[in-house]
Image (cartoon, grey):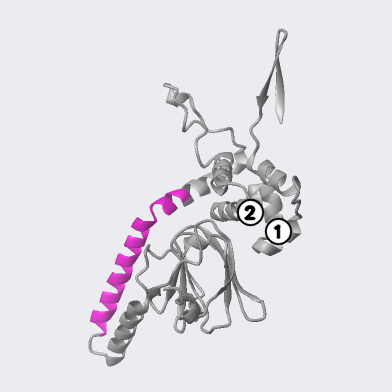
């Protein structure tokens, strides 16, 4: 796509940069391997309207920025595009990064954010607040842990004479010890109803889509996990997993870190969640 700029008798063609959505649509609809959105939607377990919204640049259809970027990364990898380039373009289009961050102009104050319609200001402020919390999550987590510790201490002292309270304290300590020594702090837990019996625990150390299926092929879990998220896999040998970014998922088997399912930014399917199978290459 080019624009013609006429200057006297000279015509200069300058390239026009494609948007992230235009790149995604072009990768899907051109070349020898043309594909339909419903087909890709089933493969990635991402709703069709979300994929359409990414191609149209209509990001307000997708609920949160983290999901927008997660879906875009998996969609780009599925189409053979550079996921980092697509994510960077979307961040720029959403106003999450400055248009002139790489400029060398001396007058930095002359650089301004693109004009935004008044009705979008609330969303922009929400994104800013989310970014602040996400970038400083370790401080929020630390404060939460201090608060929890203070509550536990108060409850312990107030119920020191009650044997039931002492028993509950021991149970809490034992449950804490059973958790693996994760590489990064836990952000959010999923599948907590499986927590007590789970032999296999997944933690995202990079952004990755994760799908778990049972022996009949029914999906029991499907979600984009961001760094720190944990999922407790149901006990048993009948479950299989698909990772959108195989190298971005740590697999813990009975508290021991298993080998990676594959390299970074590689999609892997049919991964057995059997503890013996996962530890076979240890």
Q: Quadrant of the N terminus?
A: top right
Q: Which of the 4 quarters of the picture holds residue 215?
A: bottom right
- Given contact means CB atoms under 8 Å apart, are the residues at marks 1 and 2 in contact? yes
Residue 178: horizontal and vertical position, in percent?
A: 36, 79
Q: In this picture, is 53 found above or below 11? A: below
At horizontal 66% and vertical 28% (from top left) the residue drawn is 15
Residue 31: horizontal and vertical position, in percent?
A: 74, 45
In the displayed structure, does residue 225 sit left or right of residue 61?
left
Q: Regarding mark 1 in the picture, which secondary structure is present there?
A: helix
Name the residue beneath numbered marker 1: 40
Q: Give residue 75's mark.
A: 2
Q: Which of the 4 quarters of the picture holds residue 78?
A: bottom right
At horizontal 74% and vertical 60% (from top left) the residue drawn is 39
Q: Is residue 134 located in the magenta-colored stretch of the structure?
A: yes
Residue 203: horizontal and vertical position, in percent?
A: 45, 67
In the displayed structure, does residue 210 sit left or right of residue 14?
left
How busy is the neighbourhood of tag 2: few (under 14 within 10 Å), some, or many (20 plus)?
many
State the separation of the CA atoms marked 1 and 2. Answer: 8 Å
Q: Regarding mark 2 in the picture, which secondary structure is present there?
A: helix
At horizontal 34% and vertical 56% (from top left) the residue drawn is 139
Q: In the image shown, does 267 or 231 lie closer to the viewer?
A: 267
Residue 243: horizontal and vertical position, in percent?
A: 56, 65
Q: In the image shown, does 119 or 254 lie closer to the viewer?
A: 254
Q: Give residue 167's mark.
A: none
Query: Of marks 1 and 2, which one's residue comes earlier in the chain?
Result: 1
- Magenta stretch, residue numbers: 131-159
Q: Main secondary structure of the magenta part?
A: helix
In the displayed structure, does residue 237 sit left or right of residue 17?
left
Q: Residue furthest top?
A: 8
Q: Is residue 255 located in the magenta-colored stretch of the structure?
A: no
Q: Which of the 4 quarters of the picture holds residue 187?
A: bottom left
């Amino acid at each position: 796509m080019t624009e013609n700029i006429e200057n006297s008798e000279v015509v200069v063609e300058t390239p026009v940069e494609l948007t992230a959505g235009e790149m995604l649509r072009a990768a899907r609809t051109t070349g020898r391997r043309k594909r339909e959105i419903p087909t890709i939607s089933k493969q990635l377990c991402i709703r069709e309207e979300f994929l359409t919204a990414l191609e149209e640049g209509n990001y307000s259809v997708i609920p949160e920025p983290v999901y927008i970027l997660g879906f875009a990364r998996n969609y780009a990898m599925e189409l053979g595009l550079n996921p980092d380039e697509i994510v960077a373009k979307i961040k720029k289009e959403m106003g999450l990064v400055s248009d002139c961050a790489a400029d060398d102009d001396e007058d930095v104050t002359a650089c301004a954010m693109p004009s935004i319609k008044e009705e979008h200001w609330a969303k922009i402020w929400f994104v800013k607040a989310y970014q602040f919390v996400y970038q400083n999550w370790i401080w929020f987590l630390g404060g939460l842990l201090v608060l929890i510790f203070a509550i536990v201490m108060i409850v312990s002292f107030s119920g020191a004479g009650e044997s039931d309270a002492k028993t509950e304290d021991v149970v809490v300590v034992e449950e804490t010890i059973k958790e693996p020594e994760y590489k990064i702090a836990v952000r959010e837990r999923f599948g907590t109803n499986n927590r007590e019996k789970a032999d296999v625990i997944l933690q995202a150390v990079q952004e990755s889509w994760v799908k778990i299926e049972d022996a009949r092929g029914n999906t029991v879990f499907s979600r984009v996990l961001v760094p720190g998220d944990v999922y407790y896999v149901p006990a048993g040998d009948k479950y299989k997993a698909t990772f959108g970014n195989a190298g971005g998922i740590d697999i813990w088997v009975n508290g021991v870190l298993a080998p990676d399912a594959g390299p970074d930014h590689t999609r892997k399917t049919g991964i057995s969640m059997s503890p013996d199978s996962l530890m076979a290459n240890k």
